Amino acid sequence: MKHTLWLIVLLCSVPVAQAEHLGVYQHGTVVRMRMGDCTIAHHGFVAAMGGQPAQLAAEVCPEYTLVSDKVVFVIVGKSSNQIIPLADVIDFRVHNHDLAVRIDDAKHESKFSIKEMILRSEWDLVQKHIEDQLSTPNTLTTRAQE
């Protein structure tokens, strides 16, 4: 009886451990954070586009840029206290139109709304273009100073 009980406990714990190793979670790095409006997180697209009445004190929520191997996500917290440290590698998965995030092997997940998604290859091209624009001197400004 004791061996059977241990076998059941062992079998119940194996799928959870295998799920992490089989790729249920993806890994990504948080590279940017800013505070923005919580409208998308709380009310969705329809409320954001429909003329809802102005609020007296607008709540601000964190907005993060999360870079993974293939996709870059812009995600919005559902409350102002959902904080993710910058430059941290986090585990995440897409779940019911949200991004479920686990930080530092936490027991629970935090849910974030997905605001934008872009392929990593396209995001890299945009970032390179921005860097090129910032590194080359603007010829119009140089001519105006002469």
Image: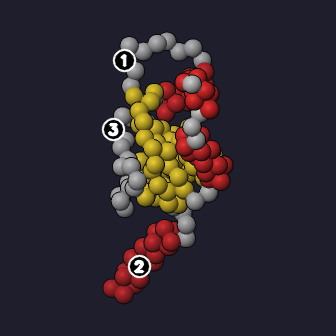
Q: Nearer the viewer, residue 91 or 120?
A: 120
Circle 2: residue type: Leu
- Closer to the N terminus: mark 2 or mark 3? 2
User: Nearer the viewer's eye, disc 2 or disc 3?
Assistant: 3
In the rendered image, the residue lying farthest to the front is: 146
Mark 1 lies on residue: 57
Mark 2 lies on residue: 10
In percent of width and height, residue 59 lies at: 38, 25
- Closer to the N terminus: mark 2 or mark 1? 2
Which quadrant does the N terminus fall into? bottom left
In percent of width and height, residue 125 lies at: 64, 49
Image: 114 above or below 146: below
Q: Is residue 4 visible?
A: yes
Circle 3: residue type: Asn
The color scheme shown is secondary structure
> In 3D space, how far apart are the residues under numbered discs 2 and 1 (Cα atoms)?
52 Å
Mark 3 lies on residue: 81
User: Is residue 110 shown left or right of residue 19?
Assistant: left
Regarding mark 2 in the picture, which secondary structure is present there?
helix
User: For mark 3, does the 10 Å Cα neighbourhood hold few (<14), some (14 to 19), or many (20 or more) residues?
Assistant: few
User: Is residue 39 shown left or right of residue 129?
Assistant: left
Q: Is residue 95 visible?
A: no
